[in-house]
Structure formats: structure tokens, C-alpha cells
Amino acid sequence: MIKRLSFAAALVLPSVAFAQTAVPIRPNHTLPQYGAVTAANSNAGAPRAMLRMATPSATGGYSPLWPPGGLRKDTLIPSLYTDGSSGTLDQIGRMADGSVQQTDIGGRVAPLDANRMMPSPVSGDTSSAPATSAGTLTARSLSARFADTHNLADYGASLNGSPDDLGKIQSIYSSMPDGSVVHIPNNSRWNGIIQNPDPQKNFTWVFDKTYDFSGYEHPPGDGDTSLSHKYGLEITRMDRDTKNWRQSPLLAFYWNDDPSYCGAYCSNWNQQSAATFSAISGPTAQGNTSPVAVGMRSFGNNPSASYDVGLPVTVFKYGQNSIWGLDISTNDYSGKSPSAFATWNEFDMWTNGQDIKTWDLGYGTPQAGHRSVFYVTIAHEHSEVTSWSAKTAMKAHASGRGSVQTASLLSVTGKSGVPYLWYPVTDGTTGATQPAFPDPAKINGKISKGTLTVTRIVDGALSIGDTVTGANPISPVKITGQTSGAAGGTGVYTVDDTGASSNDNEPLYAAPHVADGSIYWQFGEELNSSVSSVLWVTASSGDSVDTAIGFDKNVTISNAALDTTLAAVNDKAAVVRMASGQVIDFSGNGTRTGANRHTLDYENGALRYKVGGVPVLSIGDDGSLQSALPSRLPVMTRAQIRAYPSPVKGMEIYDSDDDTPAVYTGAGWKLMPLSDLPAN
């Protein structure tokens, strides 16, 4: 009986199924409500010891324990409990009343297994039960935990696809606060329609294998983000009021602030990216595999007010790292001869109708038109450049880990009329009046081990205290002295940075710091920019390119394959420049045998016209004209010669009527006397 009571008492202990913590052993008889039981009669406080009868009964053994007056509730039973302590009958009775009835276990009372866990489901309201997650410290009620997210089914939505359910979901939506995360449970049938979306609310809807977006069904709400798990993670959003636009539905952000990573210099070409998409087309696959697909459908009708971009790529340069706006590589590691579309970078434009109409008054003139497969812009940047203003805060370049500060770039024009860029050395504020910004000196030289060797002064002069900058060294160095050469001219100078270095004959600028209020300005660069090559083709030694730029037979060129009419070409530039021996072919007919039958090239000090590879006419560097074959005068009758329009002095025509050359002089056409060619 005592064992059963002890087991039953253990069943009323608080459940540890949620917290998973060990409960300390506390025998019932040690609890306060049982340890202070006293007698209810006149001699309270004098517990009665139970006496064992010493005289055996007539039948043998011991007689029942009956002290005089019968058993009392405060009768003490020695060594009643397993720990050796005694107990009274009153304690036993009260503990029995406070114990769980065996018949209630599994019905009104949840049983515990050997691990003190509840093996049976718990019925009833457990919302106020505290619980802690694994590894956490603070317990919260189950109701508080479930309130972290919302589930439409918990709010009474039937999610059966009925029209009445749309009104119920609208009511639920209206009652939820901005920023709610709402789950739609598995196997629900709801088309995702919110009848009256609130553009001021921003929800996240999580569909658990219930919604399949094909690209046209709009997700719930206005500006809300929806996640679906049916075939893969789908993230969607529709904005009806873009004034409330926050950011893209999916944002991947990565911040690299590691100063010790060695990149391309150590042949580490992999980029540390905010997002990486990878795919594998296996050896048995039929292809059509891509790691990422970008698609956009544009239905807007605002040709000059806005534009849609299929894949915008923007890179901002604030430091000295090299940047590539778009890096596309195709690598053939098959070791097999290419076939079909082996390695291509393809750019297609599918259109209808003419861009510039043939009856347009501007047809045939040089212009970009309205459609362009490649549109390249080369211009200096204005958006980050400011003009000088008084009492204005200026910022220096970012420095140190965690800094993303962009420098204030100041555009000022020197006395020469050339606009230059300057930037502040440290943060500060400009003064009341604009200081004088000098033109920088332009030099060629080399910096190494604390020494600047100037080999050429292009413009200006050097002074002690000037800072020298260029592509190299990365950071400006300050001139601290001159050890040889004419003052301020070519020679050897000392600089304040012994670790700075540059290439031989590096093009460099030199200018002093300009004091302005609480800041100093450092010379940076010229404002106007230049680009060395718009398209540069390179290859490994021994490799070749069949056609650098080609046109298919269906292409009709209405203006020119290359038009530089609108470009300004300086005296050292050329529209086309070729090396000696390289030819221009005038006879191409689309076949290999028809190539280079009539060519023009320059070689051995002369511009040469060749037919079948044989020079027939050349113009030397001295202007002399040489023909490999005899020249031939035009042949006309006497009447045709007299009728020839606007003849000029020195013009020669062979007179077929008189069988002799005719020369035009100031006095008219004259026949040239001829004589027989001597025999020897």
C-alpha cells in the first residue's frame, strides 16, 4: 500500500515534458503539510508509540498490536520510511488523500514514463503552460510562442476555396498589425486574393505547399511578400502603389571587410559573392540547363518617362580596387572538337518593323536610332561631384574596417582652364571663401625606397611639400627634399614614404595640399575622362580568330558598317589603323578563293595596290607614283574631246581621229607631235 501511495503521489508532480529538466527528489512525508501533524485530543503534542505485544498468542506467533484505548491518529510508527524516519497514522492518511487515484491515470491524469515524459496526448487548455526552447534560458507560455506568427486556420478561416471564406480572410487581414507573418497550412485551397489590400501594411505570407505561382496570379496584399514551398522556394510580390516600395522581395547582402585575403595576385579568382547559383548538366542530360534565368515582361506604355531593364548591373568605385562591370566567361574543358553552338555569348534582339523609316528625313544619317544591340556610354561622372560652397561639411575617403564612407569630390577649374578633382584628406568644413586651387605639375618619374627620380617635366614645377600621386603609388607621397638636379625640375627628390613604389617613368601629378577652413584638399585627377578601348580582343599565343566582327547575308546596311562621321578625330588618331603588310580587300565575294584579289596595303615605304597579290600601282613616301604596267590614256574622238566639259590644263586624252595624244593648254586642245620609235 505504501509503495502504491508513493507512486501515485509522484504522478501529481508538475510535468517536465516541455522543459526537459530533472526534478529533485522530495518524499511526501518531508513536505510541510505532512510534517507538522499533531494529535487532536487533550494530550496533543505527546505522540503515542506503537507497542509490540511481548506475549505470544495461544496459537503461536504474535498478537495484534492493540495498545490500551485503541489506535490513535498520532500513533508513531518507527522506521516507517525507507530513509529510516518515523511517521504517524495521520500523515499516512493525509498523503493518501492527496495522492492520485490509480483509476484516474490515463484519464483525468496524464501518466509519466520511465523518463518522466508524458506518453499520452494531453487534452485541455495548455496555452498558459511555460516552455523553453533547447539552449534558451527564458521560459514563455505556449500562447506567447504561437503568437510570434499567425496562421489563417487559427483565426477561423476555412481555407476551402469558398466565396464566403474570402470575406473571412479579409476580416482576419484587416485585424492583423503591419509586419505580420502569416502561414497558410498545407492542403489549403485559397487563391491568395485579398479583396481590399492596405498599401500601408507589409505582410509576409508563407504558403506551405499550397500555392503555385505561374507568374501571373498576383500574391496577396499590396507590396506584401509571399513564399511558396510547393516545388521549390518561390518568392513573389506585387506592388500597386510604388510610393510604398521598400526593397526587392529577395535581398542578398554580403560585406567583405577582410584585409588579409590575397585575391588575384595569389591566383584566387573566385569572387566572394552575396549569392551563388550553381547547376550541373550531367553526362546523360540533354542540356538546356542554367544556374540562373532572368526574365521580364514589360507591358508599360511610357517610352520617354521610364524604362524597364532585364538585367541591371551597377558597380560603384570608391577605392583603388579594379572593378569589372560584367565578367562573362565560357570555358571549354572537353578536349573535343567544337560542334554547333560550342561556346557563344549571345545577344539577341527580336523586333518588328523598321527602326528608322526609309522615308524618314533622317534616314541614312549617322545616329543611334531607337534600337541598339549594344549602347556604350563613356563620360565622366557628375553625380558624386560637387562644386565648392562656403561652410560646408566634407568627408574623406573611407578608412579602417567597417567604414563605408564615400569621399566628397570637388570639381574646380585651374588657371589653365582644365577641370580637376580634389578630395579632402580628413573630414571637416570648408572656409568662408574659396581658396586658390593650382594646376598640378605633370611629370614622369619613378618612386622607390623613399626616393622620387624625375626624368621629365611635362608641365609646371615641383616644390618641397608637394604631394605626388598617380595610378602608382596607391597613396600620395609628400616631397620632403631635393638631392640633385635643377630646383623644381628633373632630378632626385626624397619622399616621406619609404614603402611607396611606382613603375619606371610613371606619369605622375604633383600639387600642394590646399588649406580650406578645417580641412586640407588633396589633388586627385582630371575631371574629363578617356577610355583606352571600347572593345579589346585578346587570345593565347597560337590561337586565332576567324572573324572579329561579321555580318550575316540577311543583313542590309543602310548607312555604314563603321561610321565615324560625328566623331572628332585628332591629328594623331585614325579611323582605321593597320600594321605594315595588313591588307584591305576590295574583292571579297564570300568564298575563300575569291579573297584578296584586289587589295590595298602599305609595305616597304609605299602604299600599294595589288591584283592577285602582285603590286600594280604604288605611291612612295616621297609622293612618287609607280605603276607595274604602262598607263593608258582615255580614248575619245575629236568631237568628244572638243565637247568634254570643264577641261583643265595638263589634261591628256588620246585623239582616235588623229591617232595622237591631245593636251589641253590655256589656248585650248593641242595635238602632240609623234615620231617613230627607233629600231635600236
Image (spheres, grey):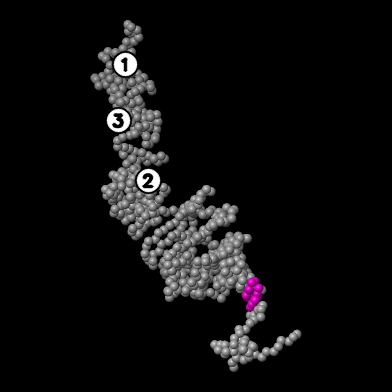
**As shown in the figure, which amino acid type bears the numbered disc 1?**
Met
Q: Which residue lies at the image location 64% right of the left edge and 88% below the top edge?
A: 659
Magenta residue span: 605-619
**As shown in the figure, which amino acid type bears the numbered disc 3?**
Arg
- Farthest residue to the front: give it: 657
**How many residues crowd mark 3 within 10 Å: few (<14), some (14–19), many (20+)?**
few
Is residue 435 visible in this depiction of the protein? no
Q: CA distance from mark 3 to mark 2?
A: 36 Å
The residue under label 2 is 208
Q: Are marks 1 and 3 in contact (CB under 8 Å)?
A: no
**As shown in the figure, which amino acid type bears the numbered disc 2?**
Asp
Vertical position of residue 41 compared to residue 518: above or below: above
Q: Is residue 612 magenta?
A: yes
Vertical position of residue 346 compared to residue 154: above or below: below
Instruction: Of the two numbered discs 3 and 2 on the same chain, state the one appearing first in sequence.
Output: 3
Vertical position of residue 474 compared to residue 612: above or below: above
- For label 2, the SS is loop
Residue 574 x, y percent position in the rendering: 56, 73
Residue 431 x, y percent position in the rendering: 43, 68
Is residue 653 visible in this depiction of the protein? yes
Residue 151 x, y percent position in the rendering: 33, 45
Residue nearest the viewer, comparing 108 with 676: 676
Left or right side of 123 for 663: right
**What secondary structure predominates along the stretch shown in magenta?**
strand
Q: Is residue 50 magenta?
A: no
Residue nearest the viewer, comparing 214 with 80: 214
The residue under label 3 is 108
The residue under label 1 is 50
